[in-house]
Image (cartoon, rainbow, N blue to C red):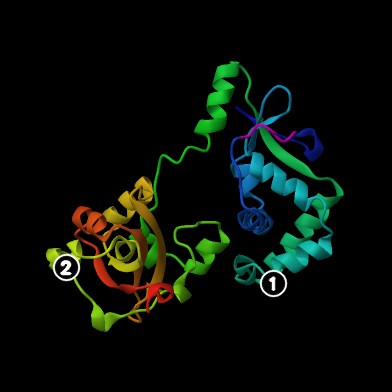
């Protein structure tokens, strides 16, 4: 299918789109488009015969918000984006000029979903956003810049570093805990927020896919000071359950909020 450029108002947002986005992530999406507008050409929005978006609804929404900005607004916003700061002066000026020209005539690159049945169009809306893949968290932690990932909208781990108390002196291997002592813990104690060190990308991927049905978890990355990063896991749930199922995890402490 060949893409074409149309006037932005011609593209109609899909009000029945089942995807939602938080305000914070929507702002990240706007920033992502501002600093890398060619993304819209590489991955055009998909429209049906009624000019309604069936693929790229959030990006279209973001562009419509950008169209309401002034060039001064855009320039100020670009100056706060890490990717923009890495560009040379001529690239920064060219990008601001691109948006100045675009504001005079807002357009969007699209592909028409011709020949699809109604059932196929419904499938496309879902399958275009289905998360079949998963992140290799070890790779991300060691080979990518966390701040850039955050700017790009990759929520691989929440920024909860301040909630953790690194207790290396109390470090215990999960497979070395006394099972009798664990059985004697009260239900409330079992539900405390516990911090684990996880160095197995396979385990992290499994936890991410399962969404830890037996409890809740959050991940943060920390720098070891040796040029390598580690993944810390904050888990709220049954200690026995997680330690029996994931012996590669190492319990290293509890969150500050839960400690007496």
Q: Mark 2 points at which residue?
A: 181
Left or right of residue 64, residue 155 in this image: left
Image quarter hosting the N terminus: top right
* Element under disc 1: helix
Give the residue at x 33% y 52%.
Answer: 207
Left or right of 245 in this view: 138: right
Q: Count neighbours of disc 1 (C-alpha within 10 A) and say few if under 14, some if 14 to 19, many if 20 or more.
A: few
Q: Is 218 located above or below residue 206 in the figure?
A: below
Identity of the residue drawn at 53% across and 63% down: 150
**Does the magenta segment cover residue 16?**
yes
Percent x, y of residue 124: 55, 28
Which quadrant of the figure contains the C terminus?
A: bottom left
Query: Residue at 53% of width from left, 25% of height from top?
Result: 123
First in residue order: circle 1 vs circle 2: 1
**Res 77 quadrant in image:** bottom right
Tell me the residue at 73%/47% (across/down).
Answer: 63
13 to 190, vertically: above or below: above
From the image, tell me which residue sits under label 1: 89
In this rendered view, identify the residue nearer to me: 49 or 107.
49
Q: Magenta residues?
A: 12-17
Q: Percent from the top left, x then y, of residue 253?
A: 31, 74
């Amino acid at each position: 299918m060949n893409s074409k450029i149309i006037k932005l108002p011609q593209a109609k947002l899909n009000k029945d789109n089942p995807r939602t986005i938080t305000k914070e992530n929507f702002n990240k999406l706007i920033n992502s488009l501002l600093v890398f507008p060619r993304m819209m050409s590489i991955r055009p929005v998909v429209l049906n015969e009624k000019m309604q978006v069936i693929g790229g609804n959030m990006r279209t929404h973001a562009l419509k918000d950008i169209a309401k900005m002034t060039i001064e607004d855009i320039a100020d916003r670009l100056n706060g984006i890490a990717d923009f700061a890495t560009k040379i002066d001529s690239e920064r000026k060219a990008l601001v000029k691109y948006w100045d020209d675009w504001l005079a005539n807002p357009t969007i690159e699209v592909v028409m979903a011709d020949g699809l049945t109604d059932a196929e169009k419904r499938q496309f809306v879902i399958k275009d956003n289905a998360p079949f893949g998963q992140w290799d968290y070890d790779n991300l932690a060691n080979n990518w810049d966390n701040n850039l990932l955050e700017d790009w909208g990759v929520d691989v781990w929440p920024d909860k570093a301040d909630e953790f108390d690194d207790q290396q002196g109390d470090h215990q291997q999960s497979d070395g805990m006394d099972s009798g002592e664990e059985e004697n813990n009260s239900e409330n104690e079992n539900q405390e927020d516990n911090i684990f060190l996880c160095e197995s990308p396979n385990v992290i991927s499994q936890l991410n896919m399962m969404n830890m049905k037996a409890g809740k978890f959050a991940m943060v990355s920390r720098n070891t000071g040796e040029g390598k990063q580690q993944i810390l896991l904050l888990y709220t749930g049954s200690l026995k359950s997680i330690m029996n199922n994931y012996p590669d995890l190492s319990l290293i402490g509890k969150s500050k909020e839960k400690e007496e």
